[in-house]
Image: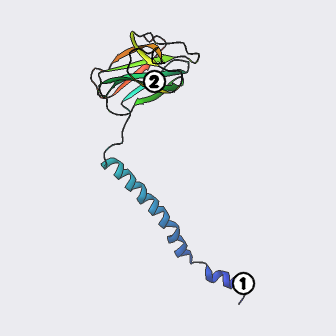
């Protein structure tokens, strides 16, 4: 038996090749349809419920304050590029008021708020807003954002933000 005949015997017929090529495509399509149906019928994933969009031309660093378990808490930092949005609270809002503090890349405040809360130079999560300096933190003035008791809110940081 010559080598060409041996190779021919091990190759499937063109009809079997066509079926074999189609089967993975069908499986991929079925898997895709299943995933789409699953995503439609299953409960939704957690969506960001408080988003901050930076509509300035500068990169900003953002800290967020809110009530957590009946105590004031501040968290930071989120870096938001120009014309970018960041999801800072991922569950439905339970607080009517959210507090924001933003700086430019040089650390200068770009929001002028009236509510004093604590921040740190590096990433932080601080419980309590009193006696920042005595506890080794920095006191900063946060802007109060009234979400009007909505469960979702987007704040647009512009060059003329309060």
Picture quadrant where residue 45 is located: top left
Residue at x 47% of width, y 67% of height? 23
Q: Residue furthest front?
A: 134
Q: Of 37 and 141, which appears nearest the observer? A: 141
26 versus 36 height, above or below:
below
Residue at x 70% of width, y 82% of height? 4
74 versus 36 height, above or below:
above
Task: Give the structural element (helix, strand or loop) at label 1.
Answer: helix
Residue 18 placement, left or right of 98: right
Q: Position of residue 58 (x, y in %)?
A: 56, 18
Spatial separation of the CA atoms under disc 1 and disc 2: 68 Å
Q: Quadrant of the N terminus?
A: bottom right
Q: Nearer the viewer, mark 1 or mark 2?
A: 2
* Pointer 2 residue: 53
Residue 159 placement, left or right of 117: right
Task: Give the structural element (helix, strand or loop) at label 2.
Answer: strand
Q: Of 7 and 46, which appears nearest the observer? A: 46
Q: Position of residue 103 (x, y in %)?
A: 52, 16
Q: Position of residue 109 (x, y in %)?
A: 50, 12
Picture quadrant where residue 70 is located: top left
Q: Quadrant of the C terminus?
A: top left
Q: Position of residue 161 (x, y in %)?
A: 44, 12
Q: Residue furthest right?
A: 2
Q: Are marks 1 and 2 in contact (CB under 8 Å)?
A: no
Other residues around mark 2 within 10 Å, as few (<14) / some (14–19) / many (≥20) = some
* Pointer 1 residue: 3
Other residues around mark 1 within 10 Å, as few (<14) / some (14–19) / many (≥20) = few
Residue at x 52% of width, y 75% of height? 16
């Amino acid at each position: 038996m010559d080598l060409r005949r041996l190779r021919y015997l091990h190759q499937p017929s063109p009809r079997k090749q066509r079926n074999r090529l189609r089967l993975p495509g069908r499986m991929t399509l079925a898997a895709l349809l299943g995933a789409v149906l699953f995503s439609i019928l299953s409960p939704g994933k957690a969506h960001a419920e408080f988003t901050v969009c930076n509509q300035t031309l500068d990169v900003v660093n953002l800290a967020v304050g809110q009530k957590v378990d009946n105590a004031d808490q501040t968290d930071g930092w989120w870096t938001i590029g120009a014309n970018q949005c960041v999801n800072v609270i991922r569950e439905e809002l339970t607080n009517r008021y959210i507090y924001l503090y933003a700086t430019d890349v040089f650390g200068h405040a770009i929001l002028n708020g009236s509510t004093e809360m604590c921040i740190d130079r590096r990433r932080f999560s601080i419980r309590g807003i009193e006696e920042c300096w005595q506890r080794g933190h920095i006191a900063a003035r946060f802007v109060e954002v009234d979400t009007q008791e909505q469960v979702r809110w987007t704040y647009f940081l512009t060059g003329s933000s309060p």
